[in-house]
Amino acid sequence: MADSDNRRKFMAQTVQSVGLAALGGLLWSGYADAVKASPLVLRPPGALEEESFLTACIKCGLCGEACRNRETNIDKETGLPRESTIKMAKGGDHRLIGTPYFIPRQIPCYMCEDIPCVPVCPSGALDMASLLNEQKELDINKASMGLAIVHKESCIAYWGIQCDACYRACPVMDEAITLEYQKNDRTGKHAYLLPVVHDKACTGCGMCEQACVTEKAAIFVLPNEVAKGKPGDHYVKGWDKEDQQRVKDAQGLETTTERSKLDSTEYLNAEVEY
Ligand code: SF4
Ligand code: SF4
Ligand code: SF4
């Protein structure tokens, strides 16, 4: 083959492989972007906010391993670990490959007291500090993996049928989820007992979602960024339970200035020295 032919062939192959690499790169970045933008992934306890998590996670799989080997996950008969909550994303899972996630309807987070998946994380993608309580101990109740949402139209308790499966499954029962009594105005005789989720206590573990008796769960966990609204800084919150508590706590405290010891009329008429 002549030199020029060889060169043409070489050039053609080079252009082809560069083109394929570029196309592959485009496809990969498109895929990665699509996955990055996917708002519906649930991460293990203590995970940073999604964008920071994706930057920090080095995809080592240690959290998944710790979850699989946790004491309660060992099959007593065989001594082998069972399928674990945390899965590491593979191609086709529609999550960034190698990152940990869980699907509560299949296997929820069991809220292990010692949270074995978190201290093993070498990158800080699972942040221990976010799970410390006032005593500086790891506390799984501090986790906020997502928020459970009740779809009232498909929850049979809202149809008047007695069901408390999600309520009973919740490890933070009566704090994260309560049953609220509501009179049935139509019959006047019956009552509803309705599951209501409370944002501050719900850890997003998904035990309620797994336990839900409907064909497709009527209660399901969504990532915080998807489930929660944001009012904006220009709104000022009115009087709430915390304010009431502050007033209650303040009663019994010593007043600190002469003027503040006066009753309201004296207070308003008192001369103030500036
Ligand atoms: S706390 Fe949840 S995710 Fe972590 S090891 Fe236990 S079951 Fe797995
Ligand atoms: S242990 Fe941390 S860095 Fe490793 S895969 Fe899990 S979250 Fe990512
Ligand atoms: S996700 Fe469900 S089971 Fe878990 S804490 Fe929230 S309400 Fe309870």
Image (spheres, helix red, strand yellow):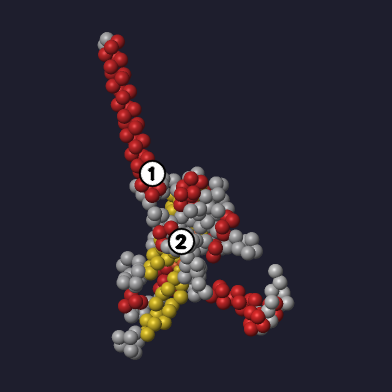
**Image position, residue 28 (x, y; %):** 36, 39
* Image quarter in which the N terminus is found: top left
Rounded to the nearest angstrom, the CA distance separating label 2 from label 1 is 31 Å
Foreground residue among 168 and 269: 269
Per the image, the residue denoted by label 2 is 232
For ligand 3, tell me if the residue under mark 2 lies within 8 Å: no
Foreground residue among 248 and 180: 248
Q: What is the three-letter code of the residue carrying label 1?
A: Ala
Q: Examine the rendered structure and indicate whether residue 92 appears above or below residue 195.
A: above
Q: Examine the rendered structure and indicate whether residue 154 appears above or below residue 89.
A: below
Is residue 31 at all visible to an observer of this figure? yes
Report the residue that reaches farthest toward the bottom.
189
Mark 1 residue element:
helix
Mark 2 residue element:
loop
Q: Examine the rendered structure and indicate whether residue 231 appears above or below residue 268.
A: above
Per the image, the residue denoted by label 1 is 32
**Image position, residue 148 (x, y; %):** 42, 66
At x 56%, y 47%, the residue is 122
Is residue 255 at all visible to an observer of this figure? no
**Image position, residue 5 (x, y; %):** 26, 13
Question: Splitting the image into 4 quarters, where does residue 243 fall?
Answer: bottom right
**Image position, residue 166 (x, y; %):** 41, 71
Q: What is the three-letter code of the residue carrying label 2?
A: Gly
Report the residue that reaches farthest toward the top.
2
Say few, some or many: other residues with alpha carbon within 10 Å of mark 1 (under 14 / 14 to 19 / 20 or more).
some
For ligand 2, tell me if the residue under mark 1 lies within 8 Å: no
At x 71%, y 72%, the residue is 273
